[in-house]
Amino acid sequence: MNKNNYSDFDPAGLNFFGRVEQSPAHFEAFMGHMECWTALKTPWTDIYDTAKLLHDGEPNDHSPFLVDIGGNTGTDISYLVNKHSELRRESVVLQDLPDVLDKIQPPLVEKITPMVHDFFQPQPVQGPIHT
C-alpha cells in the first residue's frame, strides 16, 4: 500500500507522506497547505443534511458517527461538532499522525476523540468505540 508512483521515483523509495515527514519544513508547509485548502472550501455540513444523518443513524453512546481519516487538525470535523453540540466526543473520531494530533487546539480537542492512525494501515475503528 505504501508503494505508488511517487515512491517509484523517490531515492529512498518513500511515498509522498514519508518524504514530507523527513523534513520539518516540508511537513509544516504541507500541513499549512491542507489547513488553508480545507478552510477555504464550502463546509460539507452546508451541503449534506447532517441532522437527517444523525436522526437516521440513531448513534448510541459508543457508536462512531464520523471517523475523519487523515483529518489534519480537524477543520472538517469542527464543522460537524459546531453544528451538533449534542454529539458525544466518543462518536466523532479524528485520525492522523501523533505530530498532527498534537496541534489540535481547544475547544475542538475536548469535543472529539483524537486517535493516532496511519491510514496506510488497517482501520482500527470497526465498531463501537470505548474510551
Image (cartoon, helix red, strand yellow):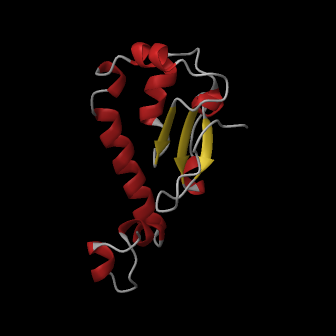
Q: Quadrant of residue 10?
A: bottom left
Q: Return the residue found at the far right.
A: 131
Q: Quadrant of the N terminus?
A: bottom left
Number of numbered discs on residues? 0
- Report the residue at 46% width, 24% height from top: 80
Say whether residue 97 is left or right of residue 49.
right
Query: Where is residue 5 drawn, in percent x and y?
Result: 26, 73
Q: Quadrant of residue 27?
A: bottom left
- Report the residue at 59% width, 14% height from top: 86
Q: Examine the rendering and report whether any part of residue 102 can be seen.
A: no
Say whether residue 36 is left or right of residue 60.
left
Q: Is residue 59 above or below residue 16?
A: above
Query: Where is residue 53 drawn, in percent x and y?
Result: 42, 19
Q: Examine the rendering and report whether any part of residue 58 can be seen.
A: yes
Query: Where is residue 71 drawn, in percent x and y?
Result: 46, 44
Q: Quadrant of the C terminus?
A: top right
- Report the residue at 47% width, 46% height from top: 69
User: Which is nearer the eye, 32 or 58?
Assistant: 58
- Report the residue at 63% width, 28% height from top: 89
Q: Is residue 102 above or below residue 49?
A: below
Q: Is residue 13 above or below residue 54?
A: below
